[in-house]
Image: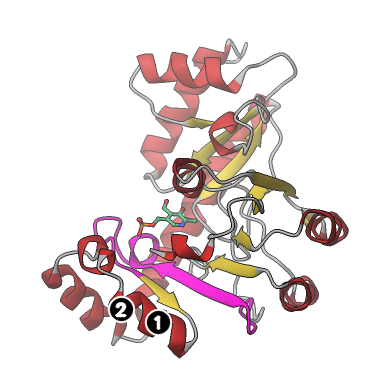
Amino acid sequence: LLDHLHTDRRSPVVVENPTYPGALAVLRARRARLLAVPVTAPGGWDIARLTDAVRRHGPRLAYLMPDFHNPTGAHMDAATRRTTAALADRYGMTVLADETMRDLDLRTPPGTEPHLAGARVIQIGSASKTLWSGLRIGWIRAGAELVRQLRLNPLQAQLSPPPLEQLIAAELLGVPLPDLLADRRDRLRAQRDHLAGLLTATGWTYTVPDGGLTLWVRLGAGTSATELAARAAARGLAVTPGPHFAADRTTLTRHLRLPFTATKETLTRAVGLLRACSGSPETA
Ligand SMILES: Cc1ncc(COP(=O)(O)O)c(C=O)c1O
């Protein structure tokens, strides 16, 4: 729906590397030229690289996930948010801040980072990660003029989910979020720690994220994430290898995204299977 923001096809679109494959798919379908800036865990965003890329290439649009970035789980500190918003103002770049994971803060107590906000920042979110993955209701928080334009866009009706689902989401959004999420956060925290514990014996490296739904794992030297994911898929386990998250599709070959959305029992089975597929000597 927001694609018309990217009208000047000569200017590139900034994406993080790695980034959410769904966003890559949309941008690729629109033949956008991608300008990738790295995000690492725990390092996060390299603001000097981002500034340099914006200055040199003049992108009009940037798609960023400042809150528990998918897949690394990194989150932007307040100063980097301010600098990013200022950069957008200065260079006339619209920032699409995807806040889909923002409420899945697993810190106790949750953090207090401000939203990535500013005159050129549009925030987008979804109920599907916080409330229920079957409830695919998204939203756009933007200035009144843009919202008015979007409501006039005929695609808006086609892209909107069914009214019943919208009503369910509207009802749920009236319930205080902390009440709604307390349980889910507790469960995710326990599952995240369980998964991290299972991985200690593998020799693979990762940073335990402060929020979100996934662990971003770096495999041992010489292990191809794509091959490992294919072997796991043949045995019934679906995991997504690093190149799916890479703007150029070819890098991040040693990375694997492991969700901790499953129960502890399932996670235990999944890691056992991954280790069996990777030829880890201590395999059960
Ligand atoms: C960062 C991010 N943004 C957006 C989405 C899409 O959300 P929805 O399920 O509402 O389509 C996802 C889903 O995986 C996501 O991880």
Q: Position of residue 223 (x, y in %)?
A: 66, 16
**Pointer 1 residue:** 147
Ligand 1 is found in the corner quadrant, namely bottom left
Does 126 lie within the magenta span?
yes
Residue range (magenta) = 115-138
Residue drawn at x 52%, y 58% is 212
Q: Is residue 18 left or right of residue 231?
A: right
Viewer-side residue, 238 vs 280: 238
Residue type, mark 1 in image: Val
Identify the residue position indicated by label 2 in the image.
151
Q: Quadrant of residue 235?
A: top left
Considering the image in quadrants, where does the N terminus appear?
bottom left
User: Callout 2: few (<14), some (14-19), or many (20+) C-alpha neighbours within 10 Å?
Assistant: few
* Res 279 quadrant in image: top right
Q: Is residue 64 rendered to the left or right of residue 1?
A: right
Distance from disc 1 to disc 2, alpha carbons, whole Å, reads 6 Å
Residue 126 located left or right of residue 40 = left
Q: Which percent across, then down, holds residue 173?
A: 30, 81
User: Which type of secondary structure does the marked residue at label 2 adopt?
Assistant: helix
Look at the numbered disc 1 and give the secondary structure of its residue.
helix
